Amino acid sequence: MKQIIAGKLYDSEKAELVLEFSRPIEMRNVFQPYTELASGQLYQTKKGAWFEIVGQSTSGEQFNVITEKKAKELIGITDPDLYLKIFDGVQDA
């Protein structure tokens, strides 16, 4: 999947797939709110930019450019061992 955002090309075929994940997404319809499980992939470009592709059964795939802070949060919650491999400076609580 490719997207050009703010004049920059984000290409899932050229970027590194860092993480596959699932997370609940709050949805609403005319009757009531509900939760849907969305699966996604987190990528990092060769220049260090982060983006995710998140798929929902009702609305298709959504492409999001995210900050490194958001990527760290997602990796830390989903796969702490991967976080420790990628990022330095983690302190014990």
Image (tube, rainbow, N blue to C red):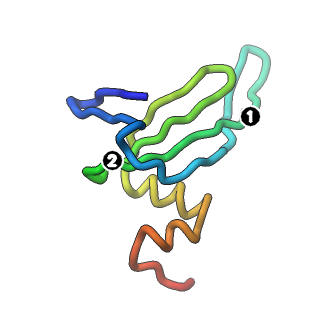
Q: SS for tag 2?
A: loop
Q: Label 2 belongs to which residue?
A: 45
Rendering coords of residue 63 (x, y %): 45, 31
Rendering coords of residue 4 (x, y %): 29, 27
Disc 2 crowd rating (10 Å Cα; few below 14, some 14-19, many 20+) is: some
Image quarter of residue 87: bottom left
Amino acid carrying mark 2 in the image: Thr
Q: Label 1 belongs to which residue?
A: 35
Residue at image x 37%, y 28%?
A: 2
80 w.r.t. 58: above or below: below
Rendering coords of residue 17 (x, y %): 47, 48
The extreme right residue here reads 31
Q: Is residue 10 left or right of residue 73?
A: left
Mark closer to the observer (1, 2): 2
Residue 24, label in figure:
none
82 w.r.t. 44: above or below: below
Q: Is residue 27 left or right of residue 83?
A: right
Amino acid carrying mark 1 in the image: Thr
The extreme left residue here reads 7
- Disc count in the image? 2
In space, the residues marked 1 and 2 are separated at their CA atoms by 31 Å
Residue at image x 55%, y 26%?
A: 61
Verify CB contact (< 8 Å) between mark 1 and mark 2.
no
Disc 1 crowd rating (10 Å Cα; few below 14, some 14-19, many 20+) is: few
